[in-house]
Image (tube, rainbow, N blue to C red):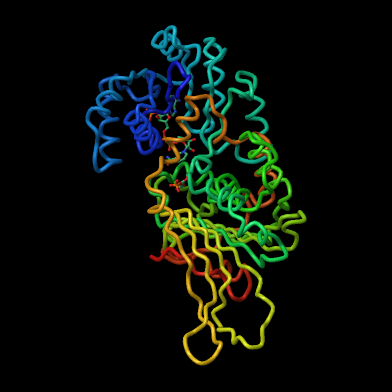
Amino acid sequence: MSTASALVLFGSSGDLAHKLVLPALYRLETHRDLDCPVVGVARSDWDTDELRRQTGEAVRAAFAEVDEGALGRFLDRLRYVAGDYDDPATFDQLKAVLGERAGHAVHYLAVPPPLFATVAGALAREGLNTASTLVVEKPFGTDLASARALDAELRRYFPEERLLRVDHFLGKEAVEDLLVFRFANRLFEPVWNRDHVRSVQLTFAETLDVADRGGFYDAVGAIRDVVENHLFQVLAYLTMDPPAGADRDAEQRERTRLLRSVRTLRRQDVVRGQYAGYGDVDGVRQGSTTETFAALHLRIDNWRWHDVPFLVRAGKCLPVGALEAVVELRDAPPLHLIERSRAAGNLVRLRLQPDAGITVEILAKEPGPRYATRTVPLQVDLSSALGPTQTAYERVLANALAGDRSHFLSMDAVEQSWRIVDPILDLDDAPLPYEPGSWGPAPADTLPGPAGWHPLSTRP
Ligand code: NDP
Ligand code: BG6
């Protein structure tokens, strides 16, 4: 349950607030998990009624069915403060609206990253930082040096225990389930190492283009947008050692320890692509060399994973929307009686999106007189087995309101992630073009080797 006296949503008129944060807060309200006022602060010349109207629209756009009672209660919680973050009057007004609730407020910064420090500094000048919590959206910095500088700046105003860095993938049930799958089942952990695993492929494919986020995306690109944060955390869940200790910090430390073992990337480890038509998107610079696709070959320098190739790819305008890991096990030693089919089994597929599921491809005896084999799937659809789950933003917001740091990034993890990608950021060569609906530029196809990537279990 929330310990916050209020939630202040900076950027309440923005895209993230509209699409994800306000709908997630409504959902918390439906479960009676929201129990404080919500104050929106943004530049648009709105009043509280307009924020309520916009929020009602956002909720109706997000859900086919709306609980009118819960929506009414949620809208009643809303207040709006209009003003520029550069203007001290905005924060005077916020202080007045918060009144005695200012003390343990949670300040959620759904604003462009260059404004994180501006808002934090302004809160401090008003004395609104003494016991409150600062939550900052992603990306945290644009490279290792800027992330360190941003952290130093924010830490002038908020101590580490009251500074939460969002990576909403940490709020995904399916991502956390990787830990349970690996360590609560006796079956898999004994083979989860270099002796038994030939390679690991991790794909985060999106069918959408950059839509109306051209201005934001062009300064960022796929590596900063989803690889160094979301996918590295998923990779850590897939490959970490069991956490030593019962608290959630132990889990976070173990993931960060894994990232520490990931070798720093070199230019030759990455294939970057840009979909045809990206240059025409509003907000994209002429001749932009921002990548909308990246495929990377990573190595983990520890005993468990020495010499196992890890292939990671992410991109916009790909043929399917999916987040899936494919773990390829080594072949069993030959048994001369058994004729191997050409389509080898021994793949463990962990599908995290769109619907979570696990498929283990095993070889079974082909009916008939001989010991011929056929690959058959052993599969479970976790979404239907486990039922509905909270969205990532619901969980992240509920944690922020409860002062629970479990679904946020430590600065250590942020630094390790930037360290890994630092040499491949802002390469001066142009990314390779690819057609929307394809799997990225041709050289990415063979990054895992001549056999290419395993087809995903998610079909177009
Ligand atoms: P938008 O540009 O859509 O929204 C920015 C918000 O900040 C608006 O409410 C805007 O107010 C406000 N704002 C900007 N400058 C000022 C200012 N000087 N003074 C007062 N208010 C200001 O950005 P997004 O919502 O897309 O992104 C916000 C954050 O969320 C970023 O860190 C982004 O990386 C992150 N994020 C976004 C995702 C998305 O899907 N959009 C996904 C994941 C993370 P107004 O419009 O009223 O001027
Ligand atoms: C965001 C990125 O962090 O994550 C987006 O900025 C991306 O570009 C999104 O589309 C994907 O998140 P999800 O939860 O929709 O898979």
Q: Is residue 151 above or below residue 303?
A: above
Nearer to me, 329 or 26: 329
Judged left or right of residue 29, residue 67 is left
Residue 426 in the image, given as x and y percentages of width and height: 62, 49
Judged left or right of residue 114, residue 302 is right
Q: Is residue 204 above or below residue 361?
A: above
Q: Identify the residue at image location x=54%, y=54%.
A: 291
Nearer to me, 332 or 262: 332
Q: Quadrant of residue 437?
A: bottom left
Q: Residue furthest bottom?
A: 369
Q: Identify the residue at image location x=58%, y=60%.
A: 295
Residue 128 in the image, given as x and y percentages of width and height: 52, 13
Q: Is residue 242 above or below residue 268?
A: above
Q: Identify the residue at image location x=25%, y=43%.
A: 64
Of the 4 image quadrants, the one containing the N terminus is: top left
Residue 247 in the image, given as x and y percentages of width and height: 63, 33
Nearer to me, 109 or 60: 60
Residue 50 in the image, given as x and y percentages of width and height: 26, 24
Q: Residue furthest left?
A: 68
